[in-house]
Image: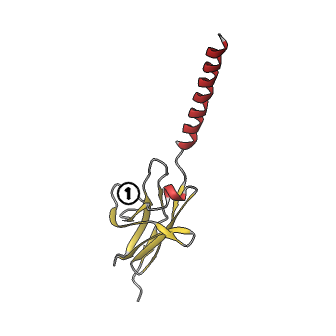
Amino acid sequence: MRAKPLIAAIGLTVFGLVSVAGTASAGTPADTRVTIKTQNGDFWGAVFTSRPLRCARERKIVVFHQLGAEQNPATDDRIASDLASLSGDRYEWSTGNTGRFGKYYARAGKTTDCQADSSETVRSVRSP
């Protein structure tokens, strides 16, 4: 008679350990990397991650006009955005021609499953 409660207790302990381990690995946001390129007011780039279906597909990318010496999404001007979509073997985004010139960067915000990232700053110049 005592074997059943002992087996039940062991089963609950194992279940609890498996649940905690599963939650810990699922709770770690995946790394994200955003790139940006520019030419004559057009902006485009890609999103790279180890979890593409959760962290790249339909990921909103916002392009900011960098106002100071450092990137600051809280104060820099948002000028355009796009959702990344599969193109060949990677997820790409593009704003089309914004007609904007100066210093810009792209940013993917943090989600439950994915870390945030900002691209390098690029300079958009008018072509002669």
Residue 128 versus residue 62: which sits nearer the camera?
A: 62
Whether residue 36 is visible: no
Spot the residue most to the top: 1
Tally of numbered tags: 1
Residue at (60, 35) in percent of width and height: 21
Residue at (61, 15) in percent of width and height: 5
Spot the residue most to the right: 3
Bin the neighbour count of mark 1 within 10 Å (Cα to Cα): few under 14, some 14-19, many 20 and up: some
Quarter holding the C terminus is: bottom left
Residue at (33, 64) in percent of width and height: 78
Q: Position of residue 2 (x, y in %)?
A: 65, 10
Residue type at numbered disc 1: Pro
Which residue carries the number 1 mark?
Answer: 73
Q: Where is residue 47 in the image (x, y as percent from the top left)?
A: 51, 63
- Helix, strand or loop at disc 1? loop
Q: Where is residue 86 in the image (x, y as percent from the top left)?
A: 50, 68
Spot the residue most to the bottom: 128
Quarter holding the N terminus is: top right
Q: In this view, does 33 lie above or below 15?
A: below
